[in-house]
Image (tube, helix red, strand yellow):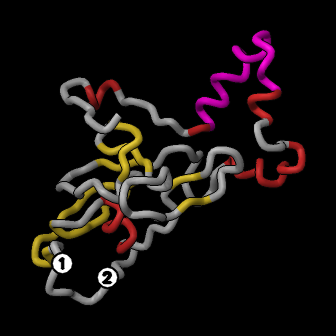
Amino acid sequence: MSNQRLPPRETQIIDPNRKITFSFDNQTVSGFAGDTIGSALYAAGVRVFSRSFKYHRPRGLFCVDGKCPNCLMNVNGCPNVRICTEPVNEGDKVRHQNAWPSLELDFLSITEKLDRFLPPGFYYKTMINPRFWHLAEPFLRRAAGLGEIDIQERSSHHCEHV
């Protein structure tokens, strides 16, 4: 991963003299004190941060203000953390959500090729019959990428972001 940064400014809060390392999908990434996880990942060359619900299209940093769902990731076992506003800490363990096997190559992105068969609201209209909902619900919830809590990692911590 590369390290691309803007030139220093007088008002920046990032301290380029204090390097911080953390992991993203089991790869070591470095940032600086004052970075958010999102800014450190972007500087390291990461451009895909999540996938859209319906077609699993790639999503990058968008608002950088914590108002959109484009940067939801699992941080230290806590799902759905908006990494565009979450400060990076030494040793953080960051994992992507809503993509398999990786953010760059997501198996469910095949649904984009099936878009003519999946009109807006198809999952509501198709699954309205309760007889079929119990079959479709687990798959749709998993595809939505709402995140999973890692019980082993979160056993002694409180997850404030959920």
Residue 160 marker: none
The rendered magenta stretch, by its main secondary structure, is classed as: helix
In contact (CB < 8 Å): disc 1 and disc 2: no
Q: Check the image and name the residue furthest to the left.
A: 17
- 127 over 24 or under it: above or below: above
- 7 over 95 or under it: above or below: below
Badge 1 crowding class, 10 Å Cα cut-off, few under 14, some 14 to 19, many 20 or more, is few
Q: In this image, 45 relative to 6: left or right?
A: right
**SS of the residue under disc 2:** loop
- Asked whether 135 falls inside the magenta stretch, the response is yes
User: What is the x, y in percent for residue 136?
Assistant: 72, 23
User: What is the x, y in percent for residue 99?
Assistant: 57, 47
Q: Distance between the residues labelled 1 and 2?
A: 12 Å
Badge 2 crowding class, 10 Å Cα cut-off, few under 14, some 14 to 19, many 20 or more, is few
The residue indicated by pointer 1 is 12
Point out the frontmost of discs 1 and 2.
Answer: 1
Quadrant the N terminus occupies: bottom left
User: What is the x, y in percent for residue 156?
Assistant: 19, 26
**Residue drawn 49% across and 50% down?**
69
Q: In this image, 87 relative to 73: left or right?
A: left
**SS of the residue under disc 1:** loop
Q: In this image, 54 relative to 147: left or right?
A: right
**Residue drawn 15% across and 78% down?**
16
Of label 1 and label 2, which has the lower sequence position?
A: 2
User: What is the x, y in percent for residue 85?
Assistant: 30, 57
Q: Check the image and name the residue furthest to the top.
A: 131
Compare residues 60 and 99 and report the one nearer the observer. 60
User: Disc 2 residue type?
Assistant: Arg
Report the span colored magenta: 126-143
User: Disc 1 residue type?
Assistant: Gln
The residue indicated by pointer 2 is 5
- Asked whether 90 falls inside the magenta stretch, the response is no
